[in-house]
Image (tube, grey):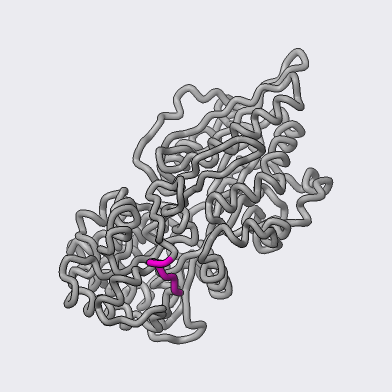
Amino acid sequence: MRAQNARRVQRISGLRVTSIAVVAASAALVLGGCSGGGSSDNGSATLKITYEKSDSFTVMDTLMKKVKTEFEKQHKNVTVDLQPITADDTDYSTKLALSLRSASTAPDIFYEDTFRVKGDIEAGYLYNLDDKLKSWSDWSQYLDSAKAAGQGDDGSYYAIPLGADTRVIWYSKPVLEAAGISVPWAPKTWQDILDAAAKIKAAEPDVVPFTMYAGTGTGEGTVMQSFYELLYGTGDGQGLYDSDSGKWIVGSQGFVDSLQFLQTLYDKKYAVTPAEALDANVWKTVVGDLFPKDKVGGTVEGSYAPSFWETGGPYPWADYADKVGAAPFPTQNGQAPGGVSMSGGWTLAMSAKTKNADLAFDFMKMAFSRENALWYDTTNAKIAVRKDVASDPSYLKANPFMKEVSDVLEFSHYRPANGVYPKISAAAQEATGDVITGKKTPQQAAADYDAAVKQIVGDDKTIAK
């Protein structure tokens, strides 16, 4: 799940919207009737915009409807055809990829996860924005680190970031205090988490002490909010990919150790049940039911988590800011840098097959105006990527945990952004599911992951570390 973000009731130029979570939902809509690439004839034009929408994520739909209205007022002969895809993150990306293959189905503009940008650049799906960005004064407001999310290996830019996010531990102050654990809580090692979970289980048998995602049901949520938090903080600290050699890492003891930690959480019944973990909607149980009822000690979620509980969000919780705490996820043994986080985000990109590049970029500029970016970031509890938004008082006040979720940027990691990564991620997700269900030992699951990686990229593209 984007693993993934919620929204609050806000007002955009007189338009009142109800914001809700950007987290994966299970509903699916077949791309079916999408006709592609904007057409232009007799002085008129149609721009086709594709983005994700679900019962728990309507913020892009709200934003696109607002921009459509404004854009059509300024461009009398242009029709903006909004084509939302109702799906979770994984299904959305699959359906989008199918549409991008053909000029007859490709939209002019589309919503794209940052980790898929480079793969789609390699496939020739994305329009090179360099010339257009040169004449857009707002581009100077974007942080260089954020710009890189839409950059190809050739140094050119192909997508514009909407916002960034990080991951931290979210914990229940009442649950920890009832177990005799002092708050604020800041575990320094993995063992500190297990020790706290043991205390909670002993003091409060009906509480889930500490849970983390696992299996393929929660998709990228499994790796971003769980497995990578462990892997990138292991003794070898290697992660998935060796950028120096350009090869994927296999034979990693850190990989085995990370799976072992998840196995321990589930075997000792500190986490939700394996059956619950494999459900794509487990996040709803954790953030929407267990947290407000003081029935979970902690979990790892994105910086956007407060928007789940804000007024107008999917699980409004009036006193969440008093009852919830946030802390960095620790490294395995407390070694430097002392914490681990993963960062990601989403972008808007233009199809290389668009017939109306100038109009499409004008639409993107309107969507990325300071006003719209401020609304998007505050509503989503996103980390701002525009400097003028990041310094805005209303943005700084929007998330009571802004300092905690921003501080972890100093040791945050990013997924390898290339075409084969989604397959690598799926193999890692499968390994976690096999371990928590007892299907395989951590060693077996790691060995099978290594074999899968070699099959995906070839032996010559792997390195043992």
In the rendered view, would you say 446 is above or below 38? below
In the rendered view, would you say 195 is above or below 321? below
Instruction: Describe residue 363's horizontal placement relative to residue 457 as left or right.
Output: right
Q: Is residue 115 visible?
A: no
What residue appears at the point 41 percent right and 43 percent down from the top-left corner?
56
Provide the major secondary structure of the magenta segment.
Answer: strand
What residue appears at the point 52 percent right and 64 percent down from the top-left corner?
400
Instruction: Describe residue 366's horizontal placement relative to residue 447 as left or right.
Output: right
Whether residue 59 is in magenta: the answer is no
Q: Is residue 446 visible?
A: yes
> Is 462 or 416 nearer to us in this picture?
416
All told, the count of numbered labels is 0
Give coordinates of residue 445: x percent, y percent. Answer: 27, 66
Q: Residue furthest front?
A: 318
> Is 289 or 187 nearer to us in this picture?
289
> Is 212 or 401 nearer to us in this picture?
401
What residue appears at the point 28 percent right and 64 percent down from the top-left corner?
294
Whether residue 325 is in magenta: the answer is yes
> Is 399 or 118 nearer to us in this picture?
399
Give coordinates of residue 225: x percent, y percent. Answer: 41, 63
Give coordinates of residue 392: x percent, y percent. Answer: 69, 58
Q: Which residues are magenta?
A: 322-327
Would you identify the image quadrant in which residue 37 lies? top right
